Image: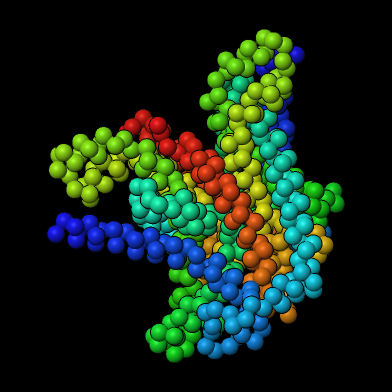
Amino acid sequence: MKKLKIFLRSLLKFMALGGYLIFALIPLYWVLITSFKGPKELYTFPITFWPKSLDIENYKFLFSFANFGIYFRNSLLVSLGASFGALIVSVLSGYGLSRIGSKKLSNGLLLAMYLTQMIPGFLLMLPLFLMLSKFGMINNLFVLGIIYIDMVIAFGTIMSKGFFDRIPVSLEEAALIDGCGTLEVLYRIVLPVSLPAIMAIFSFFFVNIWNELFLAVMFLSSNDKMTIPAALNSFISKAGISWGVMSAGLVVALLPTIIVFAFAQKYIIAGLTEGAVKE
Amino acid sequence: MSRNLKLFIMVLPTIILLVIFTYIPIGQEIQIAFENYNLYNLSNIYFNGFDNFIDIFTSVDFNFAQIVLNTVIWVVVSLVFQFTLGFGLALLLKKPFKGRGIYSGLVFYPWAVSGFAIGLVWAWIFNGQFGLINGILMRLGIINQGIGFLSDPHFALASVIVVNIWYGIPFFAIMLLAALQSVPEELYEAAKIDGAGRFRRLVNVTIPYIRPTIASTILLRTMWILNFPDIIYAMTNGGPANSTNTLANYMIIKMYSFYNYGQAAAIGFIIMSILMIYAIIYLSIFSRLERGII
């Protein structure tokens, strides 16, 4: 009887785990399958659950006629560039806030950063658009990158400060007495032991920036400047873009952040749950 | 130069960026909300009092009461299911098993994908003719004709909420799993000795212990879902017949389709006011949590 109970319980658990897995993977399965379906198979009844032949026409079309190579390059450029920029700025400010002598000042500035976290990006895009178009600074990937940096640094500062707070100051004090400068201490002593946090913060930045849609649509008007989300958005209304080509584009849009997540999962989870759980 | 000054200078770039690209724009956003500001008529920008708000509240095409109701349903239903399913997943993952690392990667990845891109994928899954769901239902013989999940006002809101639930499960699972792992094993042992079964241990030991995490994740996520138009924008853009329109998506429509910046900013102002009230509630609940009152 007891054995049966244990067996039933693990069967139930197994089925529940399987259910979650299927639910999670459905969209990936369907977008991949669709991206390999030829135009005929795409719109036929009854629908096929597995492509009859692996057709790479959609990907060919995507990268030749639909210029997806350019969008991919733009996305990669702005995501990597802005993530690196934001990493430097927020590590500096996180360290500054963590070590600054005045508790009052540090808490006040931290509060100002928390407040910005409440404001969603799409709320800011209108005034930003009007402000920057006055200076002719729209349709510019570099300017968009700066806005992306602004969008993530408050979070990066909060996260890196939290991490630096837990590194004992004693190591740094010895180095300071030996005549090392503030930046040198950060660079030589603090950063080497902070690599996991840096990895987590960078992955956060990359994922957020790579996925950003609304600012990109608003700010990038010419075809050669568009990032992948902006390009996919223009596909919706474009004639001649089948669901097959769209799916191929979606695969290219989805894979990079999934890969980043796969490699940095441990750090991302540690970073996400940092501070949320009391020890 | 003193060390403190040097440290302050390190914080300065962040402060300057936030002032220029966040704080000043918020001020301008509020100003535009009270102006007649239309891209088609840029030479005629003037202060128009509460006209934008009146236009929004009395609009026939975009019934404001319905949009508010949609927003509430969108937030509450998504949150309830995200939390319950996320908690369930966390409980399943608590004890180590072979392949747990890979498994959690495969169920947690939605956290990292673009809401817009995955919304488009799901739109194709829900497609009224060639979608996966209709395909399966037809293959099973349950229906003969495709259901217009996204074109029928009866199904549309439920469909976009399903996708939002899919998107939000990993966040709760990740946070709650970490909290679960912090519960001391001795507490369970003691409860076991007292004869508490699985369910009683969950209710009497686990949940009280991780209560602060539960409260903070729910509070954070409420705000986040309220501000998350990506999935709706990708799947229905508020349609059909306004049945999936939420405040956040409404603002995007006013900006992208009507170029009516005054009204868009007014909707933004309403969202900001809700956020402010919410933040005050959040902070008071949180300070009580810290003091152990809740």
Q: Is residue A176 visible?
A: yes
User: What is the residue that sits farthest to the right in this orientation?
Assistant: A136
Q: Position of residue B95 (x, y in %)?
A: 35, 47
Residue B77 in view, yes or no:
no
Q: Is residue B220 left or right of residue B58?
A: left
Display coloring: rainbow
Name the residue at 44% across, 45% down. B175
Q: Which quarter of the rendered picture does the N terminus of chain A lie within?
A: bottom left
Q: Nearer the viewer, residue B44 or A145?
A: A145
- Residue A176 image offset from top left, x and y in percent: 67, 13
Q: Is residue A202 above or below residue A255?
A: above
Examine the image and state in which quarter residue A187 appears: top right
Q: Position of residue B211 (x, y in %)?
A: 34, 41
For image coordinates 59% across by 41% down, the residue present is A200
Tell me if A80 is positioned left or right of B141 in this view.
right
Q: Is residue A264 above or below residue A172?
A: below
Q: Quadrant of the C terminus of chain A?
A: top left
| Residue for point 48% across, 81% down | B134
Q: Position of residue A95 (x, y in %)?
A: 63, 27
Residue drawn where x is 66% and y is 82% of the image? A38
Q: Quadrant of residue B117?
A: bottom right
